[in-house]
Every structure is written in structure tokens, then in C-alpha cells.
Amino acid sequence: MPRRIVIIGAHAAGVDAASAARKTDRTAEITLITEEKHAGYSRCGLPFVIGGQIPSFNDLIVFPPSYYQMMKLTLKTETKVTKIDTGKKVVETVDKTGKTEELAYDSLIIAAGASAFTPPIKGREKQGILPLRTLEDGEKIDQAVKNGAKTAVIMGAGLIGLETAIALQERGLTVTVVEMLPQVLPAMLDADMAKLVQEMLQQKGINILVGKAVEEFLGTDKVTGIVAGGEQINADLFVSAFGVRANTQLAVDAGVALGETRTIKTNARMETNIKDVYAVGDCAESTHIVTQKPTVQQLGTVAVRQGKVAGINAAGGYALFTGVLGSAVTQLYDTQVGVTGLTETAAQRARIETVTGTITSKTKADYYPGAKPIKVKLVVEKESQRVIGAQIMGGEEVTQRINAVSFAIQKQMTVRELAKADTAYAPPLCETWEPLVLAAEMALMKLR
């Protein structure tokens, strides 16, 4: 009898889990269930459709219906899982017509993702607070712009918040970003690097208020303004970019254990505490490669890697998930910003003593036309001299440098070894001295 694999969720983690399961077991019956109308699309692309760089929201659908047919996957859209019964090994579902169904499984993968949330702020029940998490969310924001919105307030200065702020400004809106913490990109950058990003955004005309929490939503039925840090800001459009919360209720009701991060606890095979039940993506916990402690990294790259591991294991194969570094990049106007490993602040929280090396350089030979500035900050553990993090900001070539440091951290390279790296050079492509090497030398000087 073929193996039955049921996957709750059909986005990055879920679809990659299904694909890996299919490659491992050619005969398995694999079913994906999602509450959304569209499956297998890229959430990360939403701000770039709003900004006009990508023509249509439909372009974000990475896995068209033909893909599921080719891979022999059963996809159930607009279907909600109401209960997981781990004793009977069934999931109960209801579709949009109200039809209920019981699906039996041999292996279950929970890829339930996360949902946008608005903190308990006075007036949050009012209409017109728009999150940006789903394709439909994106369409609503796009529609508000088409309907003539002239001003927007973005609440939250994380990646999605800033990318959306730029997208709306590129559509001609006057944009204000409000962030409760004292800096932009608080989860990604240290204060010194965040300050540069904030200054660049302000030069481009985005109004940024940091260290100001949203205290109230104003308006009768529909939001017309907010109070933040004691001042009133009125606008036509309000985007909630406070963050996301893992969808864990279904798992908890089924007896699946949560970890200390309040997301689903898993081992290296992505197994939960219940046999034959796996969890992946934004609802699952990871281990940080540097600290070896539980962490939550709600990134598409993590989702697909975890999905692949769970899919292989659910289909009878063997695979391990080695952990996360939180490697991430973004492009804000013509500036690229990237991070991997621990920031100086995160290292302090983990009680790791560090030194840092920071350097400002150019992306090509200084005399070559079009050379762009690049700034590299390396974080090094003082005791072992190991590289444990990097933040890079520049006009180009940030991603592959972040990837290079990610390899260095995973191979436990010391800053001394990094300073001796054999790197390439050509005037139109890079400087004679690789900025990563120069930053390593700066850190070494402090260690001496």
C-alpha cells in the first residue's frame, strides 16, 4: 500500500517538502492543504509588485497548477484543517463550501506558516489596517493606491516594512515609517549600521520615526490616523508591519510540543515530539549554528531547507537540518543590505564577548568609473577568534560576500584565517584588497 503523506500548508516549506518527498518515494500519495486561494507563491516578492518592479501579483506564483500534476501531488486550496488526530492518524478538513473530510496519513508535515499580527493597541478593531502577508493583502494595498491614496503610514521598520515603504513612495505616496524600537531593521543590524540605512532612506524622502510606539488608532469606523510617541499622524493608508506570529494552535491542540521560542519544537530531522509528525517553516523552531540555542528564523531560505529535510524523512529517507545563521539580504533603493550570523547586540545577549572590525571600501578599483561604496562589519568571538557574524551595506556585490561569511562561520573559520584569504581582483569588478579581508585585519588589530 502506498505511503500517505499529508502536508498542512502549501507555500515555500510545504511545496518543497512535497517535492522532496516525491523524489524520495515515487509511489507515495502526497496531499497539500492550504486555506489560501493561491498556493506556492513568493511572499517576499509582494512589495516589489506594489512598487511596480514586478508587473503582476500572478507573477509571484512559483509553482503553477501544472507543477502539481507533473509531480503527482494533490493540492486542496481554500481548505482549512480543523483538527489533527494523532491517535487515529487523520486530519479533519472543511472546504469553502462547508464540505468536511477526513484524510488519513502515515506521515504528517505541519507547514502552517505564520500570520501578520497587530498588537493590542487601542482602536485596532477599526477598518483599514492592512497587513502584507498574502497575495490578497498585496492586492488590497495596491487597490488603495489606485483608489487615490496620497499618504501612507507603515507601522514597523523590519524588512517588509521598509520594502513596502519604498514601494509606496515609488508609487508617488508620501510615506512615514513608525518603529517602536530605537532603530530600523532591529532584528537584522546593529545600531551603527542601522543609522546609515535610516539616513539613506531619509535622504530619499521617507519620514522615519524610531523609538515611537503606536499608541492608538484614530477614526470612527475606519482608521484615519494614529497616535505614536504622543503625536498624531493622519494618512490615507495604514500598513501593519509589526511582524508575524507562528500558526501553532492546531499543533498545540493535537499535543505537539512547543519550544522555548513558542514555535514548534523539532529535532534535526524536523520531527516533533509525536511520531510521524514533522514541522517546518515559519511555525517551527531552529537551532542557531553559533549559539547552538533555539531560535526562530522566519525566512524563505530556512523554510525551503527545512521543507526538503522533512519531505525526505517523511517519505522514508534520511536527512538532517544543520541549523540557521539568519542570513538575509535586501535592496533598499540602490543600496543592498545583508547580514549573517550574530550581530554585536545578539552576541551580547548570548553572553558572547566580541570584537568587531569595520571598514569602508569600494566595489571596484577606486579609479574605475562607477565604483560604489561598500561597508563591512565583522563580528568575532574574542576567546576563540572565530568569525561569528557580518553586516554589509553597499551599492552592489553584497549577497555573495554575505554568503562567503556564512561559509566561513559554518566552517568555524578564525578571523586570522579570513585575513589570509586568497581573493580575486580585476579593476572593473573589485579592489585589490577584498573588503572582507580588510575588515578581518581591523578586528585582528583589536585582538592584539
Image: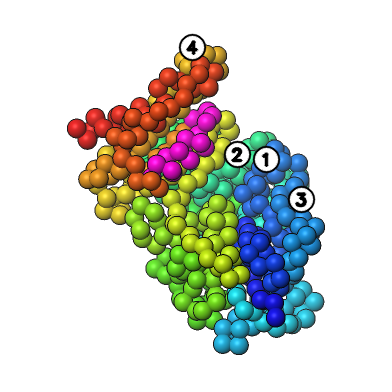
Residue 250 falls in which quadrant of the image? bottom right
- Counting from the top left corner in percent of width and height, residue 98 is at 77, 79
The 10 Å Cα crowd at callout 2, few under 14, some 14 to 19, many 20 or more, is many
Q: Nearer the viewer, mark 1 or mark 4?
A: 4
Q: Work out whether mark 3 precedes mark 1 in sequence or the reverse, and give the earlier one.
A: 1
- Whole-angstrom CA distance, mark 3 to mark 1, is 15 Å
Looking at the image, can residue 341 be seen?
A: yes
- Whole-angstrom CA distance, mark 2 to mark 4, is 32 Å
Residue under numbered circle 4 = 367
Amino acid under disc 1: Gly
Residue under numbered circle 1 = 51
In the rendered view, would you say 281 is above or below 145?
below
Check whether the beta carbons of the residues at disc 3 and disc 1 lie within 8 A of each other: no
Residue 408 falls in which quadrant of the image? top left
- Whole-angstrom CA distance, mark 1 to mark 2, is 7 Å
Amino acid under disc 3: Asn
Q: Nearer the viewer, residue 332 or 15?
A: 15
Looking at the image, can residue 195 be seen?
A: no
The 10 Å Cα crowd at callout 4, few under 14, some 14 to 19, many 20 or more, is few
Residue under numbered circle 3 = 58
Check whether the beta carbons of the residues at disc 1 and disc 2 lie within 8 A of each other: yes
Q: Nearer the viewer, mark 2 or mark 4?
A: 4
Residue under numbered circle 2 = 166
> What residue do we see at 70% from left, 38% from top?
53
Amino acid under disc 4: Tyr
Q: Work out whether mark 2 precedes mark 4 in sequence or the reverse, and give the earlier one.
A: 2
Amino acid under disc 2: Ile
Q: Work out whether mark 1 precedes mark 2 in sequence or the reverse, and give the earlier one.
A: 1
Region of the chain picked out in magenta, as a range: 394-409
Q: Disc 4 on helix, strand or loop? A: loop
- Counting from the top left corner in percent of width and height, residue 112 is at 59, 67
